[in-house]
Image (cartoon, rainbow, N blue to C red):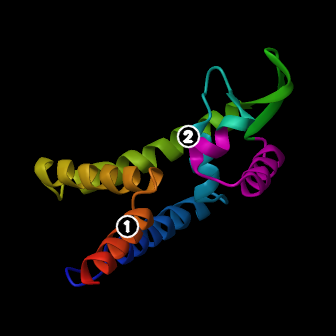
């Protein structure tokens, strides 16, 4: 993969992980998105619905569909937020907690398998690179920087 672009490696790796998790989830008539939501909901205190989307990196419409399906399957219940009358807290049902434990076990199995194949140094480097990429994207340093470089090059060539 050395001759591939960074975004290509990220995308194809994520697609492979996504497919793997969805194949595992399908064995239990669910999806990776549902498993991720189960892991993102505080199992004891519930989680405000408004904080789930950003926490999961999901758009509101996709999250709404996922939560609707989870509610229909008896994984979650919605209750009014006592601190904010307009808000809703999402709680896991006992069944949801059971499925959360399964999802957590699948994630930990994946992590352990990877950690058994890569050195601590490689893993440290992976996390460092991922953090740099995320920070550069969050701070809008990619395209703004390139535009600045292009402008600089144009000015120095004239």
125 within the magenta span: no
Crowd tier of the residue under label 1, counting other residues whose Cα lies within 10 Å: few below 14, some 14–19, many 20 or above: few
Q: Magenta residues: mostly which secondary structure? A: helix
Front one among 44 and 128:
128
The picture places residue 127, in percent across and down from the top left corner, at 27, 49
Quarter of the picture holding the N terminus = bottom left
Is disc 2 in contact with disc 1, using a CB cutoff of under 8 Å?
no
**What secondary structure is marked by label 1?**
helix
- Left or right relative to 47: residue 121: left
What residue is rendered at 75% in x and 37% in y? 76
What residue is rendered at 67% in x and 60% in y? 29
Q: Which residues fall within the magenta stretch?
A: 52-74
Instruction: Single out the residue that lies furthest toward the front.
Output: 158
Mark 1, residue position: 148
| Rendered position, 56 above or below 61 | above
The picture places residue 112, in percent across and down from the top left corner, at 28, 49
Quarter of the picture holding the C terminus = bottom left
Q: Give the numbered dot on residue 39.
A: 2
- Could you give the CA–CA distance between mark 2 and mark 1, rounded to whole angstroms? 41 Å
């Amino acid at each position: 993969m050395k001759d591939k672009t960074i975004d290509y490696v990220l995308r194809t790796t994520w697609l492979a992980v996504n497919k793997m998790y969805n194949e595992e989830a399908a064995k239990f008539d669910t999806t990776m998105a549902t498993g991720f939501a189960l892991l993102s909901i505080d199992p004891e205190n519930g989680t405000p619905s408004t904080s789930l989307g950003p926490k999961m990196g999901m758009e509101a419409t996709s999250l709404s569909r996922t939560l609707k399906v989870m509610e229909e399957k008896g994984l979650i219940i919605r209750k009014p937020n006592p601190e904010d009358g307009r808000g809703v807290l999402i709680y896991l049902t006992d069944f949801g907690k059971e499925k959360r434990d399964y999802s957590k076990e699948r994630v930990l199995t994946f992590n352990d398998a990877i950690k058994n194949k890569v050195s601590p140094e490689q893993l440290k480097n992976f996390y460092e690179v991922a953090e740099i990429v995320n920070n550069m994207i969050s701070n809008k340093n990619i395209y703004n920087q390139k535009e600045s470089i292009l402008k600089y090059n144009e000015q120095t060539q004239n």
